[in-house]
Image (cartoon, helix red, strand yellow):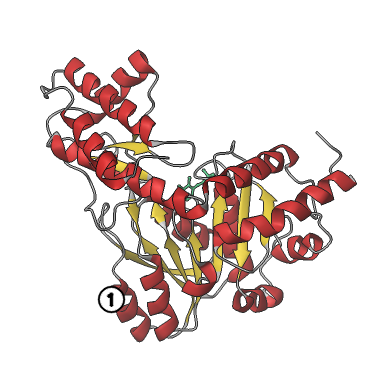
Amino acid sequence: MIGHRDQATSKLLEKISPRLKPVFGTKQDVLLIAGSGTAGLEAAVTNCVQPGDEVLVAVSGAFGERFAEICEAYRITTHRIKTIWGKSVDPDEIKDFLQRNNQIKAVFFTHCETSTGVLNPIQALSQIVRSYSDALIIVDGVSSIGATEMNMDDWGIDLLVTGSQKAFMLPPGLTMVAASERAWEIIQNNTSPKFYFDFRMYHKQLANNTTPFTPVISLIFGLEQVLTLLEKEGLQQVYHRHQLMKTMTRAAFQALDIPLLTDDVHASPTVTAVRPTDFSANTLRQVVKKEFGLILAGGQQQLKDKIFRIGHMGYCYPADVLQYVAIIELGMKRIGKSIPYGQGVRAAQEVYVTQTKLAQ
Ligand SMILES: *Cc1c(COP(=O)(O)O)cnc(C)c1O
């Protein structure tokens, strides 16, 4: 480590700051705060709204629900618009609600709902809120930023939060937050109790290339390397690679006739949820973990035991997709689900060949 008040740390922060902005699609500063993604979500609540305010939370899964629970913990009057798990938030429902409720101070969205593998149409949702309300638009981008297109400024997002351990490919423990000018005005005057998570302090100190409290130096070293990787590959190519991995993965399960939880239109490029009907998702998970060390996530809450989820974000490449599809095919055989070997792999190969050109 280097001293957290050393010149070297300031130099590191100075170098990183401008390079983070394109990943968020913003000209605003990106604050670095030690804490997991949920710390960023909680800070979004305590900095942007205050007790007594009314907010709307679009809940399309476990992480949307978490946003609502945080608001309630701070005695904020919380309205939920819930979608069936596996479906995306419908902009028309948001519009109807906002037309009937003009006192809403903030609307909370989850960009990629990691619990279901849905990518909510954040640009359309944001435009609807802007057209029908003055509410701040607050977005959880924990499992999307760095892997999917994000134009925070152009799309009118007021507060965008992400974390280190998903698409940012780092160990857990760093949350990153950017706020619009509109949001900064609200944040400046917000009287909600807070100390460690007071964005104003982070913003002020960032101007001097430092942080109000000890920065999480080890992860910030890593962050510099991650930005180098993203820049070398090019953000557009990074986004394209994730789309490709999504399409390869989905094609594989479609070819094997195993249902996916989400439809093609709102499927996330970072995580795919598979909902088998004639074998146990959890038994499959156990088998592939034991035999091959392949870790598939399970379902959360109401989808517990019903789905398995494949994370294909960050350090993940088409070669990994071919490998995990082949392993999952073997795992299914092991647990007695009869499938023709290679059918999923072949579909993924076909997607790969048709969607890429031979590298020079
Ligand atoms: C993982 C995740 C979080 C929570 O982050 P922690 O780092 O576990 O606190 C929040 N939102 C989404 C969408 C996530 O995927």
Q: Is residue 18 left or right of residue 64?
A: right
Residue at 33 percent of width and 57 percent of height: 60
> In the displayed structure, does residue 225 sit left or right of residue 68?
right
Q: Nearer the viewer, residue 217 or 110?
A: 217
Q: Quadrant of residue 286?
A: top left
Find residue 301 and report its horizontal and vertical position in percent.
Answer: 33, 43
Q: Secondary structure at mark 1?
A: helix
Q: Quadrant of the N terminus?
A: top right
Q: Is residue 351 left or right of residue 17?
A: left
Pinpoint residue 176: horizontal percent, then vertical percent. 62, 54
Name above or below for residue 42 compared with residue 179. Answer: above
Q: Residue at x 55, y 50 (%)?
A: 38
Q: Residue at x 82, y 46 (%)?
A: 9
Q: Residues within 10 Å of mark 1 (few under 14, many from 20)?
A: few
Q: Is residue 5 visible?
A: no
In the image, residue 180 sits, relative to residue 86, either above or below, namely below
Relative placement, left or right, of 338 versus 173 is left
Instruction: Look at label 1 and name its amino acid.
Output: Asp
Residue 165 visible? The answer is yes
Residue shown at 35% from the left, 49% from the top: 243
Above or below, comparing residue 309 to residue 148 in the picture: above
- Residue 298 is situated, as x and y percent measured from the top left of the image, at 33, 34
**Residue of label 1:** 92
Q: From the image, which quarter does the C terminus lie in?
A: top left
